[in-house]
Image (cartoon, rainbow, N blue to C red):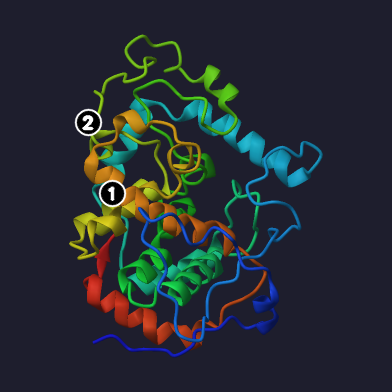
Amino acid sequence: MIIPVENPVFVHEDFKTQKKTEDLQLDNIIPTSKTSPDDDVFLAPEVNAFGHQFRDYADANNERQKGVEEFYKTQHTNQTLDFVKKMRQEYGKLDKMVMNIWECCELLNEVVDESDPDLDEPQIQHLLQSAEAIRKDYPNEDWLHLTALIHDLGKVLTLPQFGGLAQWAVVGDTFPVGCAFEESNIHHKYFMENPDFNNPSYNTKTGIYSEGCGLENVFMSWGHDDYMYLVAKENGSTLPSQGLFIIRYHSFYPLHKAGGYTHLMNEEDKDNLKWLHVFNKYDLYSKSKVQVDVEKVKPYYMSLIKKYFPENLRW
């Protein structure tokens, strides 16, 4: 049974005075939003929480931007194929903890993403902002609401009880390893320090893969995306394939934002990418200082968790 919550709202109503984003309605090959009769739709802010354009990595004089660039230098240097295989083997055991989805959501109160140039709020607010924004425009796609709520839960990898991984091994844009690092990656120049950069087995366009092999068969840089995908899949989540695809590739900006690595995709990937494009608008543009009333929306999301997940999960 799904518990409805009518007219989900953000705490500050003046958020609705923001200019409507012009590109939430994508072209006709992309699923379009199903707005309610009163046109109660998500209104995207024009700037991020710091008053800048979203995903603006170019301001070298901005202290937060300098930290973000240093983050990517470290990430690009250390995310090798061997490292990814090691992490997948270790964390694929799912032996760190047993807890339910909402308990994990609450753990994110302790996490701030150092790679994000748009927001420095605790992550649980970002989860709820994304989910509530999508719910306004896609009221009938409850799996998408829940996907938005849980998509970043893998960031608990930074916490001591999960091994306290460094942020470069948890957050930031993701990319394939085992093949050439395409220039569609942010701060591409720092890959030159990666041991795989000059490895002839890995530095060709397809590397260890083949054209059209499917992203499921590609090793992605290790982080919260891949970890949460493993958690959902191995615990028997009944989320549709589109939801699992969003969870695993929502940080794969070189693909869904810049159009890189498409030669590795198969037909199922192309279909699922349509939904990732929809999701990304809300994942990015819902980041705001506007807070969601957690207690008001919690019953709705608890009912979705019960629908798509077992009560307790191995993490």
- Is 303 placed above or below 53 here? below
Q: What residue is at 22 percent from the left and 55 percent from the top?
A: 233
Q: Quadrant of the N terminus?
A: bottom left
Q: Which residue is mark 2?
A: 213
Q: Position of residue 201 (x, y in %)?
A: 32, 12
- Counting from the top left corner in percent of width and height, residue 193 is at 54, 18
The kind of secondary structure element at disc 1 is helix
* Residue 245 in picture, x, y percent from top left: 31, 51
179 vs 277: above or below: above
Residue type pointed to by label 1: Asp
Discs 1/2, front = 1
User: Which mark is first along the chain, 2 or 1?
Assistant: 2
Q: Is residue 311 visible?
A: no
The amino acid type, in three-letter code, at marker 2 is Cys
Along the line of sight, the residue nearer the viewer: 17 or 177: 17
Question: Disc 1 to disc 2, how far (Cα)?
Answer: 15 Å
Q: Residue at x 40, y 64 (%)?
A: 32
Give the left or right position of residue 222, taking residue 119 as reference.
Answer: left
Q: Is residue 131 left or right of residue 61?
A: left
Q: Name the spot of residue 203 as percent of width and height, x first.
A: 39, 15
Residue 301 located left or right of residue 189: left
Seen in the picture, residue 22 relative to 265 is either above or below; the reply is below
The residue that disc 1 covers is: 271
